[in-house]
């Protein structure tokens, strides 16, 4: 039986061969996550300026909002989402986002590592066991 650790990409390399992004609690990056410029020497900064932090977070918020709408349609309006091929649309958006990162950000990725997301939200890994009767959809 293999474990997830043996099947995953090693922590020190990503699929594109570039340096890994920083997860909370890990080593601080040597360049700004937004512009790729040098970081201030002091502290655990991951952005060189507040403008870079704002640009990074604003891009993530905009992209997230677009994907959120499509995912909610997929999850709760399945017939319409299937007709519109929402999963393909979400994949196309993700590919476009990655292409933008490669073209405009020298390949620096604009998403957090899965390990960091799961560390911040351990409940995502929880298995819900419910032995009660289903009440069905709420009105």
Image: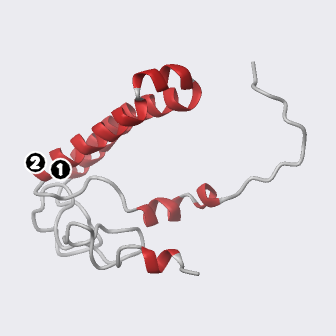
- Residue drawn where x is 50% and y is 19% of the image: 80
Q: Position of residue 117 (x, y in %)?
A: 46, 59
Q: Are marks 1 and 2 in contact (CB under 8 Å)?
A: yes
Q: Is residue 88 above or below residue 30?
A: above
Q: Quadrant of the C terminus?
A: top right
Q: Is residue 89 above or below residue 7?
A: above
Closer-to-camera residue (16/46): 16
Q: Quadrant of the N terminus?
A: bottom right
Q: Residues within 10 Å of mark 2 (few under 14, many from 20)?
A: few
Image position of 95 (left or right of 26): left
Element type at marker 2?
helix
- Residue drawn where x is 19% and y is 51% of the image: 52
Residue behind mark 1: 101
Residue behind mark 2: 104
Image position of 90 (left or right of 79): left
Q: Position of residue 12 (x, y in %)?
A: 29, 79
Q: Position of residue 49 (x, y in %)?
A: 18, 55
């Amino acid at each position: 039986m293999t474990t997830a650790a043996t099947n995953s990409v090693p922590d020190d390399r990503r699929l594109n061969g570039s340096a890994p992004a920083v997860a909370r609690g890990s080593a601080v990056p040597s360049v700004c996550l937004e512009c790729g410029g040098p970081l201030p020497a002091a502290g655990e900064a991951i952005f060189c300026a507040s403008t870079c932090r704002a640009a990074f977070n604003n891009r993530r918020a905009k992209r997230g909002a677009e994907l959120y709408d499509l995912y909610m349609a997929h999850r709760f309006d399945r017939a319409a989402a299937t007709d519109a091929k929402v999963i393909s649309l979400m994949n196309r958006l993700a590919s476009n986002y990655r292409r933008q990162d490669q073209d405009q950000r020298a390949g620096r990725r604009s998403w957090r590592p899965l390990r960091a997301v799961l560390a911040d939200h351990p409940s995502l890994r929880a298995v819900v066991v419910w032995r009660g009767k289903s009440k069905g959809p709420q009105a």
